[in-house]
Amino acid sequence: MHYHIIPQPRDMQELDGVLKFDTQEVDIEGDSIRCINQLELPKKVSSRRKPIEATGLDHTYISIGTLDPSKFPPPEHLQGYRLVVQEQGVLITSKSEQGLFYGCTTWNQIVRQADNTISTLDISDWPYLEYRGIMLDISRGRVFSLDYLKNMVTRLATMKINVLQLYIEHTYQFEGKETIWKGSGAMGREDLQELQSWCSDHFIELQPNLQSFGHCNRILTTSEHRHLRESDLYWTLSPALEETYDFLASVYDGFLPIFESTLLNIDSDETYDLGRGKSKELQSEMGTGRLYLQHLMKVRELAQAHGKRIMVFGDVIVKHPELISQLPDDIVYLDWIYDPKSHYDTTDR
């Protein structure tokens, strides 16, 4: 039988034999209780799950049956795995627990497509991309419930997605700033902490995402914070005001410690009115590009206070190629384009 696996493994050898689950109970042993517990079995087959400790091997494994884990070395990539199905049993090996987890998700996909007979095979797989993720917008429309997000994380993990960002403009319950998020269905601290823990359990890096320049309409139309606006467009935080950075610092203080990731996406795209309001004088002195860069550097410092490197959309800075050589190497630039192309030339700049 040919199995359809998402994503398609790099190397999948389909062999001639079959593994039959004739008994109603099997032993599953391995050195990762987390992975052992998430391994699925054919219908009507139960298991005795047996965690083991020191194996003397240079890799981790899970086995059903009598295959020798020392005879089936995994790929060297830490997210890679090897999955072997023979008549004697099933073996998953990896150089890391994360890779072992991905091997288990592949096995689970196979089990869901089979009955109590599994075709023999030998899969070696590792990712083409180190980071594979999605950004989910929770600022326009209803905010998803925690149960929905946890179910989504579980589904993403089966497809070996390992990064998730929740795009936030105002939909987090910032302490002492209720007017920003009131009535929006904003996520609370406890829910976000639980989601962080759930993501960790599924080897997904939950990266904080918070608009920190443009797209701040909801914030800037509140009576408490409208003075921070760049202009009467009520869209961009003004870089001409020191209070802007006091505000961002206070927001980061309550938000960033929730996340284990060392990255923060500050977005900061589409700053339409930058230099057209309160910062007009600064813009005439230094230019729009340098004014934007100055803001990035200040926000970078605020993020560093929490042990975070910033990520930023590159749509603004790419319009000022003369400044690119001045950008710190620790800033991660993101290229957002809605249309499918054979080549994205902005990544070459």
Image: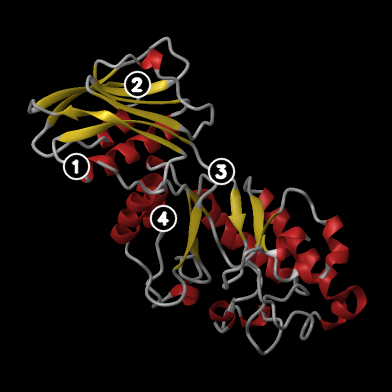
The residue lying at 36 percent from left, 16 percent from top is 69
Q: Amino acid at mark 4?
A: Leu
| Residue picked out by circle 3 | 130
Judge the density around disc 1: few (<14), some (14-19), many (≥20) Cα neighbours within 10 Å. Answer: some
Cα distance in 3D space between marks 1 and 3: 30 Å
Give the amino acid at mark 2: Asp
Does label 1 or label 4 sit earlier along the sequence? 1
Q: Give the SS element for disc 1.
A: loop
- Secondary structure of the residue carrying numbered label 2: loop
Side (left or right) of 340 relative to 48: right
Q: Classify 10 Å Cα crowding around label 4: few (below 14), some (14-19), many (20 and above).
A: some
Give the colouring mode of the picture: secondary structure
For label 2, the crowd category at 10 Å Cα-Cα, with few meaning under 14, some 14 to 19 and many 20 or more, is some
Residue at image location 57% in from the left, 69% down from the top: 340
Task: Please identify, in this view, whether the residue under mark 1 or under mark 3 is nearer the observer.
Answer: 1
Q: Where is 208 relative to 104, above or below?
A: below
Q: CA distance from mark 3 to mark 2?
A: 24 Å
Point out the image quarter for the C terminus.
bottom right
Q: Between 260 and 158, which is closer to the camera in this rendering?
A: 158
Residue 330, position in %: x, y? Answer: 73, 48
Disc 2 target residue: 31
Mark 1–mark 2 Cα distance, whole angstroms, equals 26 Å
In the image, farthest residue toward the right = 285
Q: CA distance from mark 4 to mark 3?
A: 25 Å
Q: Which mark is residue 192?
A: 4
Q: Which residue sits at x=43%, y=13%?
A: 57
**SS state under label 3:** loop
Of the numbered discs 1 and 2, the one sitting upstream in the chain is 2
